[in-house]
Amino acid sequence: MADSKLRALACVGPAYSPDVSSQDADLPSLVPPDIELVSLVKAMEEIDTVAIDGVYVMAHAPINAEFLDKVNKLGKIKVVSNYGVGTDHINLEDCRARGIAVGHTPGVLTGATADLAWALLMACARKIVEADEYARGPEYTVYRNMVFLGQDVHHATIGIVGMGRIGEEVARRATGFRMNILYHNRSRKPAAEKALGCTYSSLEDLLRQSDYVVLVCPCTEQTTGLINSDRLKLMKSTASIINIARGPVIVTDDLVEALSSGTIASAGLDVFDPEPLPRDHALNKLRNVVMTPHRGSATAQARRGMAELSLANLAAGVRGEALKTPCA
């Protein structure tokens, strides 16, 4: 390693693997030439003599005070750069207390994630997964008029919980279906209301009125367990709930009960609690659930944008420059 090389610790997943190519095969070729990604094992072998300048995070590797104090013995870490927009696995306060900037990748994955919310919504509304299975199976030998009846999406009411960038994109797509758009957020968004024709609502009223509830909020102490049994019971029996936020926003056992009992019609889930679910989990056995394995931003275009932006944040941070997209 040349003396001029800046060093960033590569942390992939809860095991802190250094194998970034396991998540994005193109990423190693995009790393700036003046930066070396190093493994936790190598970093710890040299911890007393060779400084780490930054931390590069993929696949929700946990970053907290204990971890930072272990790897930052020489006090040179200036940045934690996250490949992704969600940072619930990074303790932002612990980073701030140590003067470490945190970067993430908003914007580049907004459209892709909103698209997946709509894919799940449409699949629930029209029972696409069940109908696909039937169309391929031995029972489909004659036309049957009243099987797999879904619910209209056009002119229905959609309730969006969390009106950030992705929430606004979900709402923008709803205008094309001429839907009544409700939203709940920590604060009102007058600009979005004007541009998208959406209406601010309390969470309880949104749940009562919506045909489709889409969860797009961050996972925080306040939103963990936000959708529980009592709130699920507020929803229409014909309604569907879509979760592209984080698994813990919904109480999993309460959701299983609501789906099993007919309290709500269906769920479209891209995230789970726990994640991944045990293979014998009750949710896996319910036919009124459509699942994707945390694929919100999984398009080729979004992934390339995430790689480029996260590496740009990393490079800026280790060089002592302002991050392109710092966390607030």
Image (cartoon, rainbow, N blue to C red):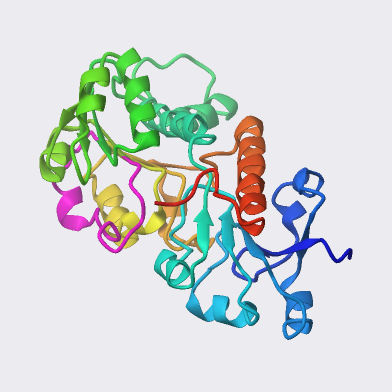
Residue for point 59% across, 38% down:
298
Lateral position of residue 6 relative to residue 327, left or right:
right
In this rendering, the answer to whether 104 lies above or below 273 is above
26, 232: nearer the viewer: 26
Q: Residue 270 at what x, y percent from top left?
A: 46, 45
Q: Residue 187 at what x, y percent from top left?
A: 19, 42
Whether the magenta-drawn stretch holds residue 224 is answered as: yes
Q: Residue 279 at what x, y percent from top left?
A: 54, 61
Give the farthest residue toward the right: 2
294, 126: nearer the viewer: 294
Residue for point 73% across, 56% down:
20
Image quadrant holding the N terminus, namely: bottom right
252, 306: nearer the viewer: 306
Question: Which region is colored magenta?
Answer: 215-239
Whether the magenta-drawn stretch holds residue 56 is answered as: no
In this rendering, the answer to whether 98 lies above or below 146 is below
Q: Is residue 276 visible?
A: no
Residue for point 69% across, 51% down:
23
Q: Is residue 200 visible?
A: yes
57, 204: nearer the viewer: 57
Lateral position of residue 34 relative to residue 126, left or right:
right
In this rendering, the answer to whether 219 lies above or below 299 is below
How many marks are shown on the rendered structure?
Answer: 0
Question: Does the magenta stretch mainly form a helix, a strand or a loop?
Answer: loop
Q: Residue 131 at what x, y percent from top left?
A: 47, 27
Residue for point 76% across, 52% down:
21
In this rendering, the answer to whether 247 lies above or below 107 is below
**Residue 80 in which image quadrant:** bottom right
